[in-house]
Image: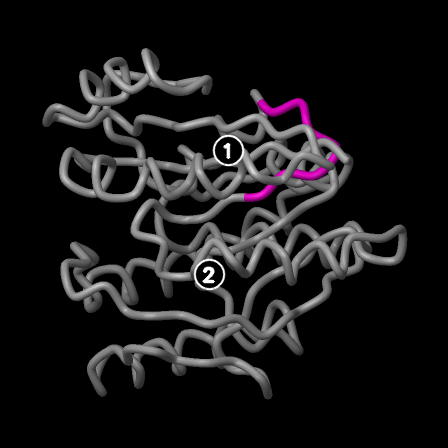
Amino acid sequence: MNFSIIIPVYNEEKRIPDNIDKIFNFFNKLADHKIEIIFVNDGSADNTKKILEDYKNKYVFQVVEYGTNRGKGYAVKQGVMAANGDWIVFFDIDLATPLEEFNNLLNHINTENDIIIGSRRLQGSQIKKSESKIRTFLGQGFTKISNILVPGITDFTCGFKCFSKKSAKTIFSLSQIHKWGFDTEILYIAKLKNFKVKQIPVSWAHDQDSRVKVFKAIFSSFRELIQMKANQLKGLYK
């Protein structure tokens, strides 16, 4: 099985040295699979670019980069369009979802599932370190509103998702949302295209150093939900 692993990064000069060895040590042990790793540098203004260049002396990976910060949704889209794997996985550099969950993911790779997403809100999920109560409350509210467009999804924003090559190329070629609402949009497009989505429980730990401004992200995402429906009515997802 061929996998493309996409890791979007923005101003991650601290987290990359903390976690890049863990990432390559883990995937280099999976001898039964051919794996390419793609970092997408989303217009970082710190030393992210240089740090990635330095690590190319140690590991083999691809870097997709551009000069202006465009948002996580845009970064993941660029990684997907550059990917060659039969299955395309993306997760965050903070490893909030541990790498070991990839082994669980492998159990669900089959012709019945086009998309497999991690959820922190299923039976069997383990929250090792919780978010604040207000972040949890706002996140649950966002899920309920997103369910108007995509019923049945328990966790839109968990940063651990896997797509078949066909579903990924189809969905991301049509995606329009570049900021935090992109998770809902890609699952909305999946629904419109009748791709089968499998949810699996995962372990997860909140990163205390998260730079996500939760109020701004949530309310921006609410506006983007309205935009998604407008995009669909305009025929942009055909």
Considering only vertical position in the picture, is 35 above or below 123?
A: above
In the rendered view, does 179 fall on the left or right side of 165? left
Q: Are marks 2 and 1 in contact (CB under 8 Å)?
A: no
- Identify the element where label 1 is drawn: helix
Look at label 1 and name its amino acid.
Answer: Lys
- Dot 2 crowding, Cα within 10 Å, few <14, some 14–19, many 20+: many
Q: Is residue 84 magenta?
A: yes
Q: CA distance from mark 2 to mark 1?
A: 18 Å
- Identify the element where label 2 is drawn: helix
Residue behind mark 1? 77
Mark 2 or mark 1: which is in front?
1
Look at label 2 and name its amino acid.
Answer: Leu
In the rendered view, does 188 fall on the left or right side of 19? right
Residue drawn where x is 58% and y is 50% of the image: 186
Q: Which residues are magenta?
A: 83-89
Quadrant assignment for the N terminus? top right
**Which of the pair 3/141 is nearer the observer?**
3
Quadrant assignment for the C terminus? top right
Residue 114: x percent and y percent?
78, 51
State the image quarter where residue 141 is shown.
bottom left
State the image quarter where residue 62 is shown.
top left
State the image quarter where residue 201 is shown.
bottom right
| Outermost residue to the left | 46
**Which of the pair 231/126 is nearer the observer?**
126
In the rendered view, does 67 fall on the left or right side of 160? left
Residue drawn where x is 68% and y is 28% of the image: 34
